[in-house]
Image (spheres, rainbow, N blue to C red):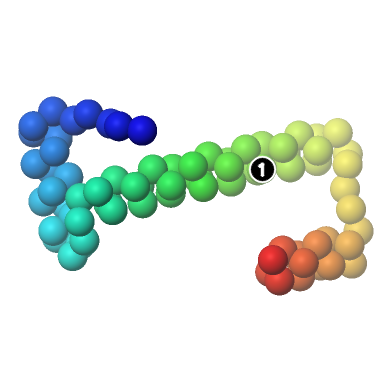
Amino acid sequence: MEVRFTPEQEAQIIRAAKSQGTEAERLVRDAALHFIDDANFRAAVLEAEACAGRGEFIEEDEMDARFEEMLRS
């Protein structure tokens, strides 16, 4: 995949990367991956809200077990 920036945008990215002690390519890649993680989290929250709105809940013990499993994986 290739992404194109204006020269001004590229200069801003390079300055931001330098200020963080990294390379521009890594900064852009990390930002894109962070965006994907954030979008996935928001989707999960919306689904959870929809489930709660329908009255679909699980018991606390089951939630604790699911949470522990998530931490292990």
Camera sees residue 30 = yes
- Quarter the C terminus occupies: bottom right
Camera sees residue 60 = no
Crowd around label 1: few <14 · some 14–19 · many ≥20 (10 Å) = few
Q: Which residue is mark 1?
A: 44
Q: In the image shown, does 54 or 9 lie closer to the viewer? A: 9
Residue drawn at 66 percent across, 43 percent down:
44
Q: Position of residue 43 (x, y in %)?
A: 62, 38
Residue drawn at 76 percent across, 70 percent down:
68
Above or below, 27 against 55 in this view is below
Secondary structure state at the residue bearing disc 1: helix
**In this picture, residue 21 sits left or right of residue 8:** right
Residue drawn at 72 percent across, 37 percent down:
47
Q: Position of residue 50 (x, y in %)?
A: 76, 34
Q: Amino acid at mark 1?
A: Ala
Q: In the image shown, does 11 or 1 lie closer to the viewer? A: 1
- Quarter the N terminus occupies: top left
Q: Position of residue 72 (x, y in %)?
A: 71, 71
**In this picture, residue 18 sits left or right of residue 39:** left
